Image: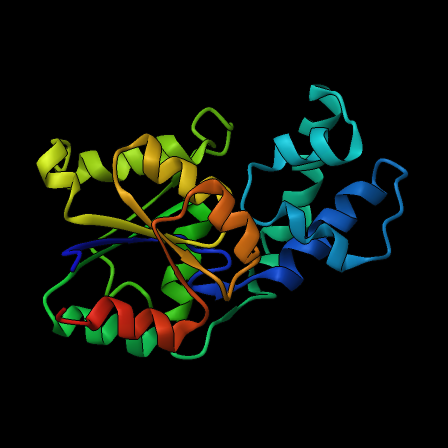
Amino acid sequence: MFQNLLFDLDGTLTNSAEGITKCVQYALRAQNIEEPDLKKLEVFIGPPLRDSFIKYYGMTREQAEIGVEKYRERYTDIGIWENKVYPGIMELLADLQQDGRRLGMATAKPEVFALRIAERFGFNPYLEDITGCSLDGKTDKKALVVAAALEKWQLTTSEAKKTVALIGDRREDVLAAHANGIACIGAGFGFGSYEELSEAGADYYVSDVPALARFLLSKA
C-alpha cells in the first residue's frame, strides 16, 4: 500500500461547506448578485475561486479578482472557522503515522490559510509538510501544488511516484494527481459525487472515512 500520502483539505480533512459558501455568497452580493441557495455554491469548493466566479457567474477576469478580494474579506477571520474536521480523520492520521506512513497536505487553498487551519485543528503533529497555493493566484492550479509537494519530498522519479497517492474529493484532485504521475483515491464523503470522481478517472474510491481507513491500513 502507499507509503506516502498527500491529503486534500476541503472536503477531505475538513467539512468547510458553511464557511466557503457563505463567503462566496458575500462576494457575489458585493457585485449585486443574490444567491440564497448555499447548496448551489458548493461547486466553489475545490477549484480555484477565480475560475469558478468566471465559470458559474460569467464574470470577467477583473470581476473575478474583485470576487476573490471580497471572499477573503469575510473568510480571513470568519469563514475560515466555519469549518469542522470530519469524524474519524484525526484517528486515521494517528493510525497512519503509527504505521510509519509519511503524511502531507496538498491543497489549492492559499497556503497561509491552510497553515492556520492545520494549527487550529491539530493536524500539525501528523503532517510532515503543508503545501498550498499563493495568494496572487499564480500557483492556484492543483497540479502545481502537487508537483511542489512531490518536489519537497524528493519523490520525482516514476518509481518513487508509485509510492504516493493523493486523497481528494473533486475532479481537480484526480486530474492533478494523474498530471504528476501518482494515484488518486476519491473521497466520496466530500463534495464531489461518485460520478464526478469516476469520470475523472479516480484510481480508487471510498465512500466514507472508515472505508478510507480500511483501504489505507490494509496490508493486502
Expressed as whole percent of the image width and height from the top left, the position of residue 212 reads: 34, 69
Is the residue 13 above or below the residue 76 in the image?
below
Q: Is residue 14 left or right of residue 143?
A: right
Total labels: the figure holds 0
Dividing the picture into quarters, in which one does residue 216 lie?
bottom left
Dividing the picture into quarters, in which one does residue 118 lie?
bottom left
At 66% across and 48% down in the image, what residue appears?
A: 43
Q: Is residue 146 left or right of residue 44?
A: left
| Quadrant that contains the N terminus | bottom left
At 51% across and 44% down in the image, what residue appears?
A: 199
Foreground of the two, 109 or 113? 109
Is the residue 136 above or below the residue 81 in the image?
above
Q: How is the image coloured?
A: rainbow
Expressed as whole percent of the image width and height from the top left, the position of residue 189 reads: 50, 66
Expressed as whole percent of the image width and height from the top left, the position of residue 39 reads: 74, 59
Question: In this orientation, does residue 58 appear?
Answer: yes
Foreground of the two, 149 or 176? 176
At 63% across and 31% down in the image, what residue appears?
A: 50
At 41% across and 69% down in the image, what residue appears?
A: 121
Expressed as whole percent of the image width and height from the top left, the position of residue 94 reads: 23, 75
Question: In this orientation, does residue 110 appear?
Answer: no
Foreground of the two, 67 or 205? 205
| Quadrant that contains the C terminus | bottom left
